[in-house]
Image (tube, rainbow, N blue to C red):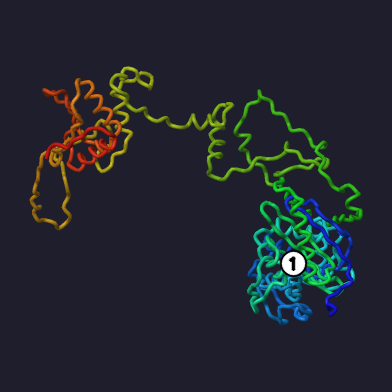
Amino acid sequence: MVPATLSAAPFAAYVIDARTGQPIYKQNESTRLHPASLTKMMTLYMAFTAIERGQVRLDSQFPVSTNAASEPPSKLGLRAGQRIELRYLIRAAAIKSANDAATAIGEGLAGSEAAFAQQMTQMARALGMNGSNFRNAHGLTQEGHYSTAQDMTILGRRLFYDFPQYYNIFSRRSADAGIAQVASTNKRFLDSYQGADGIKTGYTRAAGFNLTASAQRGNKRLIATVFGGTSTAQRNQVMAQLLDAGFTRVPNRVREVRPEAPRLLAQRVVRRAQVQPTLAATQPEPQRLVLDASAPPVRVSRTASASTAAVAQPVPAPQIRAAETVAGGLTLAVSARPLARPGSAPMAVATASQAAPQTASLAAPVLAQSVRPAPAPRRQADATVSANGGADPADIARAVAEAVPQNGGTSMSLLASPSPKPRSETVILAAMGEGDIAEPEALEIVSRPDSSGRGWGVTLGRFTSRAEAEQLLLRSALQDGAILEGARRDVADTNRGFQASFVNMSKGNAELVCERFVSRSQECQVVGG
């Protein structure tokens, strides 16, 4: 029997060390071929990128268009008009290689499949995939849709390093896709090759049997791509041979070189404003304020007397002007002062100043007419020196008493005021409220000795000298001041030495202190009770 899976598609292969990106084997690696469903690797890369940027979430509901629902198999079975979570679309596209799920992802992210394909190509350029051009999200044969074995290997390495949190989806044998349970199209190779953990298969009649695979053995990891296989079995066999040969050629330990972040190119539109010259912009202003033409302020002689009458003299209404324009400028020399309100202090100043001699101070007439306050009596020690020209203190006291008005016959003078009543020595402990006329209840006074409940103590042993015992008590008091508060240090001279003790303690504190000392390997005994 002749195999029905024969294909005349060109063959290409490319193998790299995933740790460094260095090539190990290449054959027609730059030839532009049909990638088939390997295209979904870029579709998933775009989806992972959108999730990490916060544009969408795994539980985002994506609508299914008529275009997506009508894609040919392999497909998930989406219906036009339904909404499905992005996580299920990703599982269907990665594991089952569903064309309708891939189209729904592209339309949901970019608005249309054409716009999404353009974004895929831009991302490919940013990743260094210069031999790829995308026209759809699923990889079905279309004019102008192509890639290379080298580019797909680069993309497989990018999926491994850029999105390790999502990479394990390519090693699943099955998954729940929301509306159906899907099985992996790469299950045969994952089960047959040791260390294989992904990533994607592809097949069309024009492309043949394609596969991008990743495998790890020990510290080594290889990523390889095969284009143009004649069958699934032949493709898997060629892939296994390439990986086996690659594992024997790469060193066990190398310096890992992670790929750099993709350099996305953004179009920057620069718009220049076209401004036509106008008459207002080219001609000077017709009216301007010329400061050079303003008259200088009038200089007032310092020797001239400042007469308050001249300042307060009212100006006739026709002659009052806020400012006078001189040659287009403003001058302050002819400005008049504002009129004073009738009955206000400035009018009083003007009246008083007519009879008063001219002085340089405006407040001088007011001070001259004002009545000085009577000086207060001074201390007895200063009575001989009076502030009013040395007057008699008795006259000053009499003047102060007469100057203070009488209120109801009671003099407010300090000399005539009666002396305060002596303060009562009775201490009022409490005030009864109105109507509370009952005798206060007798208080029961309970007295107890100061040392009640504090007849306990602790002994810290005997020492050969008093100084040594006192030093121990002082050090302990400083170290445990919180629990020894209120305790008294005591050194007793006994026949067997000087006994150091803390006394005047409660039983609980004594026991607590002893526990503290014993924990520090210090002899201690509770006494008293």
- Disc 1 element: strand
Which of the pair 296/265 is nearer the observer?
265
Q: Quadrant of residue 436?
A: bottom left
In percent of width and height, residue 390 lies at 35, 18
- Extreme residue toward the front, this view: 1
Left or right: 264 in relation to 337: right
Q: Amino acid at mark 1?
A: Lys
Q: Quadrant of residue 340?
A: top right
Residue 278 vs 293, above or below: the answer is: below
In percent of width and height, residue 120 lies at 80, 64
Which of the pair 185/490 is nearer the observer?
185
Residue 1 vs 462, above or below: the answer is: below
Left or right: 422 in relation to 27: left
Which residue sits at x=17%, y=55%?
A: 433
Q: Which residue is mark 1?
A: 200
Which of the pair 243/113 is nearer the observer?
243
Which residue sits at x=78%, y=54%?
A: 16
